[in-house]
């Protein structure tokens, strides 16, 4: 890194941590380069997690450009009230003490749409500004869409200052199709008015892309903890250099085409993250979770509520039947629209019931935490405002109510009255029964009323109106929330009241899930520990992560407690699955490692995978009688039913008969209800086929996805939901275990290959001619030993007997030999969860487990457990004395009944693999495409991430298998040696600033600032675990002078700049209380030429170091790179 910061020593030493200085330095360094052949300046993506202090880093970055001579900056964010947070960030870093730097909120400037902005800003500048000047305009994305032309006109054609896209995930909706000319003269996604299911560009994404295309020299910074969850959603980040001239992908279409390949699609985000970190365009850190407690609490719903839910289920099934009778001659699409609207309303209805079921428990928990000295934050999504507004429109704002609104009832009533004929007797009966249901009230209003009312509860939801109960009369009336202040300031005032301690309970929705700080900050009065209760999960992981980040942020006194409440209604798993899937994709991008998301309580709930689809297909086949239910799939409810029947002492034939009857009862019930919710169609009569002797009623195979299945089971009785979802999860476990057994398990992301016997044999460095030095590739050879020795098997048995003396675990041998004459040998261990108690029947007799874990001498641990009855049918028990000789023989001689080898060699192409993916794609057919895997040796000293080119037996006698593996290895090597040269830049290249410098800015125990971006994403090891920063503690472990000395000695800071001070920061804002020295900026002389400051382009070497330059001058925004103000690689013009 060659960039030299111009920020003052007080700001670097007192107001910014080392980790925050690192991001500013790397962003400025990246902005010194241009995309090859495109004429656009490179951008930088700051992906720090919520609470790290991204606002301060942005403020420091903008201030750095102000001191370098830029006069204008644009800060785009999600909400208008975040302008106050932006001003706070500038104040916290000490930037507002500089005369000339002004922050303007575009919304409050009241600029007419048909008038230029320049007069408003310039008039304010003339009031007392005498030195260098910078205007920072804060604008929301919605305002950017409406006022894009005005903003572009104000910035100017040659603008080269900062543009910050804060909360940039708002622009992530980018389609992946062809593009066509649009209203701004560039490109637009085909199908802007697309049909259902197509992905297109949103207006926000279009505006963000257009702004970057029209201002190619602007210094763009993307800021978000949740930037994108899919590769195609990175379309708005056009400055990252993922595709285009000089890269392996000529355009975005080819980039998405390669990244969507079957073998790479699920690991695309990890590869993108690795590449961005490697070339210095991306930095992501997260707060340390040391001390943070996570709890996924299960809440059993009462029987009364279950009865209410089941009544609603039967009412909705009748409603579905009525919608199925809709006939429309005029518009054939009307019925399709009605059905979609009905199912969407049904999903919202039952989501409301699932949320309301947990409200009593949340109220109890909140009161309990308040009594124990906590401050409570409750997260939800739906506010019921639309239902309240509709009711108030009929009865008036002055009306009084006996109870709070029931949103679920209004949802059902509206969809029925909108699409079904009101004169139909069946419809009238449904409406009458719906009104008779005592459905729960609005959860938000109930929570506020039960926890003390508006005087005790801070509500940050964005509602304009709400219903409140008057303490004296008990009457419920409507109250406007913008009476005391504007609606934009309501959330700000409520946040302040919570942080002051005036209110100890805070309820937040999506409207307050970005930018707002609710942690136990050291600077606020309310320093109680936060108990963050998630009542209702968001529809996307982005919003869930953002909402959880409100109460875990930097500078906090004590870390929070997170509680995610799940009810016993199985259909609620649908929402947990959707969030878990996005959490894994999100962890892939921001951490470069999908495993980083598994720390979350919901990460294991994802069932929307290809294995989930396979499990659902098997479930359909079982329910429709196409296949028999596998005997080794036993959900918990089925095993409990068999245990209650006390049949384990009976013969195996009788046990199978009882099991079949229990399953048949379940199948009949599930099939009937799934037909009612239109998952299954009604049976149709088919002609006799080869497998049918006569005509029969056959149900066609449904084409219902996992997501739709999870939506529809919400409209099933609660007990049946639990059974059906439990059976589906048992089948899913079986499918996953079978895939692992076949070594075909690939759920998404980069799988890690672990093992007790993995070692690196050799690693060859590929010398690529005519390629940049940063493109480093290696071919590594690993040896994998899957065997399980006799000593380890004996140890397993001893551990099992020590835990349970009556265990049935032991050694078994197959009754009949395999094709090669060898018998299967195995160690069968009881498959019980760790710490689980042994089950007993009513008479106290020990119940055997339903399945066993299998271990074999040559293949090791078998992924799929084996059913108890199947184990006894196919095998005979063997005593250890006899088994020892057989086991050692197969292990030593590498004998497997199936012919597999115990020792295998794996060829892994690792390093900068993403730029060479098109080459690999051209070599291998789609069905043979190498997987992206992570391999870690047994001693955990070596880890590599790369493409699995081939595997082959280590045994030299396996000549054909080894020849094929070496054939693919040689083809890859030859193709890489002859590929077209790439313009590939990395912070280690000569043209990117020379050798990287590494500086410890914090001392022992602090965060080491490494200016080489390759450090957290090295070519050798690939992505590391997420870099954690504990900013709650004082990360400035060294004094100001020592930190500045380290920066200066590394050539990363110059102290020759003088700064036009406006005023000193008060002592209570974090400074020492002394007045800052007031330095007069050099006034512009008459003969000075601003257009020729004597500098060169960022890529040319400077003739004079910036450390020799004089004070910062007042310069205008340059039109060309060669006309810019002084940068770290070029000098500022000396004073006369």
Image (tube, rainbow, N blue to C red):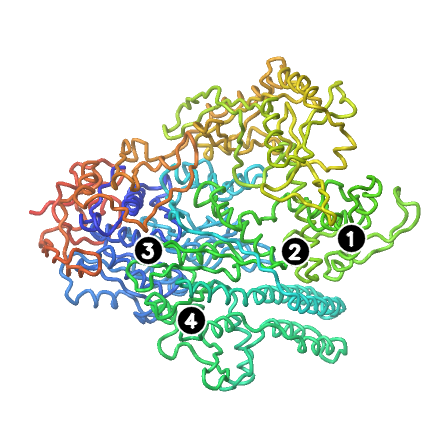
Q: CA distance from mark 4 to mark 2?
A: 37 Å
Front-most of residues 167 and 809 = 809
Q: Do we see residue 907 in this rendering?
A: yes
Callout 4 environment at 10 Å: few (<14), some (14 to 19), or many (20+)?
Answer: many
Tag on residue 557? 3
Callouts 1 and 4 close, C-beta under 8 Å: no
Tag on residue 708? 2
Determine the image quadrant of residue 1127. Answer: top left
Which residue corresponds to the image point at 30% horizontal and 67% vertical from the top-left?
Answer: 116
Callout 3 environment at 10 Å: few (<14), some (14 to 19), or many (20+)?
Answer: some
Q: Residue furthest front?
A: 843
Q: Which residue is mark 1?
A: 667
Callouts 1 and 3 close, C-beta under 8 Å: no
Q: Earlier in the sequence, mark 1 or mark 4?
A: 4
Q: Foreground mark, 1 or 4?
A: 4
Q: Earlier in the sequence, mark 3 or mark 4?
A: 4
Indicate the position of residue 997 as horizontal and vertical percent values. Answer: 27, 34
Q: CA distance from mark 1 to mark 3?
A: 55 Å
Q: Do we see residue 158 in this rendering?
A: no
Q: Which residue is mark 4?
A: 457
Tag on residue 924? none
Callout 3: helix, strand or loop? Answer: loop
Q: CA distance from mark 1 to mark 4?
A: 48 Å
Front-most of residues 50 and 486 = 50
Q: Foreground mark, 3 or 2?
A: 3
């Amino acid at each position: 890194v060659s960039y030299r910061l111009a920020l003052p020593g007080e700001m670097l030493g007192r107001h910014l941590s080392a980790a925050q200085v690192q991001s500013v330095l790397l962003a400025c360094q990246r902005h010194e380069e241009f995309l090859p052949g495109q004429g656009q300046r490179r951008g930088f993506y700051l992906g720090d997690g919520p609470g790290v202090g991204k606002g301060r880093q942005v403020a420091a970055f903008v201030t750095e450009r102000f001191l370098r001579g830029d006069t204008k900056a644009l800060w785009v964010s999600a909400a208008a009230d975040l302008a106050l947070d932006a001003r706070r960030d500038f104040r916290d870093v000490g930037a507002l003490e500089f005369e000339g730097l002004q922050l303007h909120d575009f919304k409050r400037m009241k600029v007419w749409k048909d008038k230029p902005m320049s007069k408003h800003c310039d008039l304010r500048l003339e009031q007392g500004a005498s030195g260098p000047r910078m205007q920072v305009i804060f604008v929301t994305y919605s305002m950017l869409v409406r006022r894009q032309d005005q903003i572009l006109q104000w910035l100017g054609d040659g603008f080269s200052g900062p543009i910050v896209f804060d909360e940039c995930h708002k622009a992530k909706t980018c389609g992946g199709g062809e593009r066509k000319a649009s209203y701004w003269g560039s490109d637009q996604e085909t199908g802007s008015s697309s049909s259902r299911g197509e992905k297109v560009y949103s207006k926000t994404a279009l505006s963000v892309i257009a702004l970057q295309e029209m201002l190619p020299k602007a210094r763009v910074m993307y800021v978000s903890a949740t930037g994108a969850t899919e590769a195609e959603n990175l379309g708005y980040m056009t400055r990252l250099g993922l595709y285009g001239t000089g890269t392996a992908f000529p355009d975005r279409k080819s980039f998405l085409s390669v990244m969507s390949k079957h073998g790479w699609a699920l690991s695309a985000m990890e590869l993108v993250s690795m590449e961005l970190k490697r070339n210095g365009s991306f930095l992501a850190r997260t707060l340390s979770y040391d001390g943070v407690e996570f709890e996924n609490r299960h809440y059993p719903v009462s029987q009364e509520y279950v009865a209410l839910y089941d009544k609603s289920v039967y009412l909705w099934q009748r409603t579905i039947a009525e919608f199925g009778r809709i006939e429309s001659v005029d518009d054939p699409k009307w019925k399709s629209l009605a059905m979609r609207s009905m199912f969407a309303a049904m999903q919202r209805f039952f989501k409301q019931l699932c949320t309301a079921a947990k409200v009593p428990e949340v109220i109890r928990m909140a009161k309990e935490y308040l009594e124990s000295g906590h401050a409570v934050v409750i997260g939800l999504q739906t506010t019921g405002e639309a239902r309240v507004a509709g009711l108030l429109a009929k009865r008036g704002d002055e009306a009084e109510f006996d109870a709070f609104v029931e949103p679920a009832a209004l949802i059902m009533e509206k969809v029925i009255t909108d699409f079904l004929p009101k004169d139909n007797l069946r419809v009238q009966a449904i409406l009458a029964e719906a009104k008779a249901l005592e459905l729960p009230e609005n959860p938000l209003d109930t929570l506020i009323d039960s926890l003390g009312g508006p005087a005790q509860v801070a509500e940050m939801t964005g509602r304009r109106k709400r219903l409140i109960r008057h303490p004296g009369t008990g009457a419920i009336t409507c109250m406007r929330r913008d009476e005391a202040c504007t609606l934009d300031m309501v959330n700000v005032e409520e946040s302040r009241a919570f942080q002051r301690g005036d209110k100890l309970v805070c309820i937040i929705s999506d409207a307050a899930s970005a930018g707002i700080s609710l942690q136990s900050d050291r600077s606020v009065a309310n320093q109680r520990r936060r108990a963050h209760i998630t009542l209702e999960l968001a529809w996307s992981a982005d919003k869930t992560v953002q909402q959880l980040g409100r109460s875990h942020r930097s500078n906090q006194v004590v870390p929070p407690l997170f509680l995610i409440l799940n009810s016993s209604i199985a259909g609620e798993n649908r929402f947990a699955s959707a969030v878990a899937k996005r959490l894994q994709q999100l962890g892939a991008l921001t951490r470069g490692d999908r495993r980083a998301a598994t720390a979350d309580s919901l990460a294991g709930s994802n069932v929307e995978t290809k294995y989930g689809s396979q499990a659902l297909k098997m479930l359909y086949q079982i329910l429709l009688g196409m296949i028999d239910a596998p005997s080794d799939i036993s959900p918990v409810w089925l095993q409990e039913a068999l245990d209650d029947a006390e049949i384990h002492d009976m013969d195996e034939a009788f046990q199978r008969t009882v099991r079949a009857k229990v399953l048949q009862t379940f199948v009949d019930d599930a099939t009937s209800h799934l037909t009612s919710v239109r998952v299954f169609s009604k049976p149709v009569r088919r002609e006799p086929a080869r497998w049918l002797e006569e005509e029969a009623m056959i149900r066609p195979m449904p084409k219902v996805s996992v997501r739709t299945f999870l939506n529809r089971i919400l409209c099933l009785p609660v007990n049946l939901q639990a059974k059906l979802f439990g059976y589906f999860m048992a089948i899913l476990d079986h499918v996953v275990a079978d895939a692992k057994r076949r070594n075909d398990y690939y759920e998404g992301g980069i799988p890690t290959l672990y093992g007790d016997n993995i070692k690196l044999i050799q690693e060859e460095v590929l010398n690529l001619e005519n390629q940049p030095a940063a493109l480093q590739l290696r071919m590594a050879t690993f040896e994998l030993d899957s065997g399980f020795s006799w000593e380890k098997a004996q140890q397993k048995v001893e551990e099992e007997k020590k835990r349970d003396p009556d265990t049935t675990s032991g050694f078994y041998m197959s009754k009949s030999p395999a094709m090669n004459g060898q018998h299967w040998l195995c160690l069968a261990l009881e498959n019980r969860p760790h710490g689980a108690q042994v089950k007993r029947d009513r008479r106290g007799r020990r119940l055997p487990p339903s399945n066993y874990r299998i271990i074999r001498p040559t293949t090791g641990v078998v992924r799929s457990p084996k059913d108890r009855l199947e184990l006894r049918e196919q095998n005979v028990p063997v005593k250890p004395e006899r088994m020892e000789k057989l086991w050692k023989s197969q292990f030593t001689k590498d004998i497997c009944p199936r012919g597999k080898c115990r020792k295998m060699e794996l060829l892994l192409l690792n390093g900068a693999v993403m730029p060479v993916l098109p080459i690999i794609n051209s070599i291998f057919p789609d069905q043979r495409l190498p997987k992206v895997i992570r391999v870690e040796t047994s001693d955990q000293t070596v880890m590599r991430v790369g493409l699995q080119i081939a595997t082959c037996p280590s045994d030299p006698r396996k000549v054909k298998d080894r020849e094929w593996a070496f054939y693919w290895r040689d083809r890859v090597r030859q193709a890489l040696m002859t590929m077209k040269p790439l313009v590939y830049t990395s912070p280690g290249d000569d043209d990117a600033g020379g050798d990287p410098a590494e500086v410890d800015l914090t001392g022992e125990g602090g965060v080491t600032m490494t200016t080489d971006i390759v450090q957290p994403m090295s070519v050798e090891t690939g992505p590391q675990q997420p870099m954690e920063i504990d900013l709650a503690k004082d990360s400035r472990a060294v004094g100001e002078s020592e930190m500045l000395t380290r920066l200066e000695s590394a050539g990363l800071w110059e102290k020759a700049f003088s700064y036009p001070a406006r005023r000193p920061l008060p002592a209570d804002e974090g400074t020492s209380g002394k007045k800052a020295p007031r330095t007069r900026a050099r006034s512009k002389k008459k003969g000075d030429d601003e257009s020729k400051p004597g500098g060169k382009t960022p890529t040319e070497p400077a003739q004079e170091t910036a450390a020799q330059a004089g004070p910062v001058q007042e310069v205008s925004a340059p039109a060309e790179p060669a006309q810019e103000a002084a940068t770290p690689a070029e000098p500022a013009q000396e004073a006369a």
